[in-house]
Each structure stands twice: as C-alpha cells, then as structure tokens.
Image (cartoon, rainbow, N blue to C red):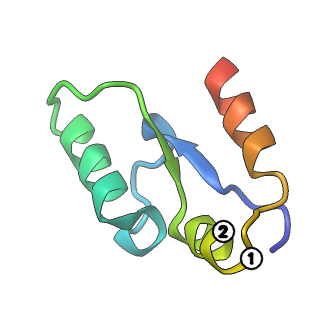
Amino acid sequence: MGTHTQVYLLSEARGLSRDLLGGKGFGLVEMAQAGLPVPPALIITTEACRRFLKEGAVPGLWEEVRAKLVA
C-alpha cells in the first residue's frame, strides 16, 4: 500500500474525491466548506476500509489515527 495518507482531518480533505473519502466523508467535507456546523472528524479512506475488510488489518492505520488526534 505504500506510505500515502489513509486518514484525513476534515480541513485536509477539501478537494479530495468522493471515491477516496466515501459518501459520508465527502458529505461532511462539503458541509464544512459550506459553513455548516460540523463536529471535528477524521475520515479514513475507502481504500483503507476495503483493505481492512479484505485483510483484517491495515498496517500503520492506528498510528496515523493517533497522530491526527493530537494534531
């Protein structure tokens, strides 16, 4: 899978695709961009989600989540 981003804060996900963020994640980004009140959130990419469902684990995912939570 490489070392690309698997987890985004809402503010980092602006301009990313629905395919990458999933429908709910993309919708949250759109609402935040429109100025609607959206609670702080992390978006785990659809690729990471699919990998987890297929393999049962995604190396580095929890470390990336933890790093975003303290950012």
Secondary structure state at the residue bearing disc 1: helix
Residue 35, image x, y percentages: 17, 30
Q: Is residue 37 visible?
A: yes
Quadrant location, the C terminus: top right
Residue indicated by mark 1 = 55
Q: Residues within 10 Å of mark 2 (few under 14, many from 20)?
A: some
State left or right for residue 55 relative to residue 60: left
Q: Is residue 71 visible?
A: no
Amino acid type indicated by mark 1: Glu
Residue 14, image x, y percentages: 40, 49
State left or right for residue 53 relative to residue 17: right
Amino acid type indicated by mark 2: Phe
Residue name at image x 16 percent, y 38 percent: 34
Query: Which labelled disc corresponds to residue 66?
Result: none
| Vertical arrangement, residue 29 with respect to residue 2, above or below | above
| Vertical arrangement, residue 63 with respect to residue 4, above or below | above
Residue indicated by mark 2 = 52
Q: Where, by quadrant of the figure, is residue 53 drawn? A: bottom right
Alpha carbon of mark 2 to alpha carbon of mark 1: how far?
A: 5 Å
| Vertical arrangement, residue 28 with respect to residue 41, above or below | below
Closer-to-camera residue (38/63): 63
Residue farthest along the top direction in this orientation: 70
Residue name at image x 84 percent, y 59 percent: 59
Secondary structure state at the residue bearing disc 2: helix
Residue name at image x 76 percent, y 63 percent: 57
Residue 40, image x, y percentages: 40, 26
